[in-house]
Image (spheres, grey):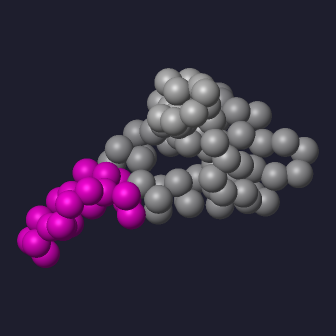
Amino acid sequence: MNLQVNDKWRIVSDSEQWIAQKFNVREKGKYVGLGEWVSVAYFTRPDAAALWLAHRRVRDLPGTYPAADALEVLGGALQGIAEDINEVLGEMR
């Protein structure tokens, strides 16, 4: 199964596990410019993989925010995550 979360992240599975993968474009070596999916984390359940991706996206938010703005930034990130998940779930139905 392949759950495309967005253009940079997806969750794939095999008979034993769920794998969070990130799209990477090579910057060095023989295959400069070649895009490939790189496995980043492994899970036994799909919900654990989805939750890990949500946490990852929040942790990867750039910048430093004063306390007053932090909730607004976090809320925007969580809204984006919810939209991505709803889109994937809609495609599965």
Q: Is residue 70 above or below residue 32?
A: below
Q: Residue at x 78, y 60 (%)?
A: 44
Tell me, yes or no, if residue 69 can be seen here.
yes
Dividing the picture into quadrants, the one containing residue 13 is: top right
Residue lying farthest bottom? 67
Q: What are the residue bounds of the magenta stretch?
A: 58-78
Where residue 92 appears, as percent x and y from the top left, is 65, 30
Quadrant hosting residue 58: bottom left
Picture quarter containing residue 68? bottom left
Q: Is residue 87 above or below residue 62?
A: above
Which residue is rendered at x = 50% and y = 24% of the image?
A: 33
Which quadrant holds the N terminus? top right
**Rendered residue at 88%/51% (across/down):** 16
Please identify the dominant SS of the magenta region.
Answer: helix
- Is 73 magenta? The answer is yes
The magenta stretch spans residue 65: yes
Asked if one can make out residue 47 in the rendered structure from this viewpoint, the answer is: no
Q: In which quadrant is the C terminus drawn?
A: top right
Could you say where residue 4 lies in the image, as x and y percent from the top left?
A: 58, 32
Q: Give the farthest residue toward the right.
A: 15
Q: Position of residue 62 (x, y in %)?
A: 26, 56
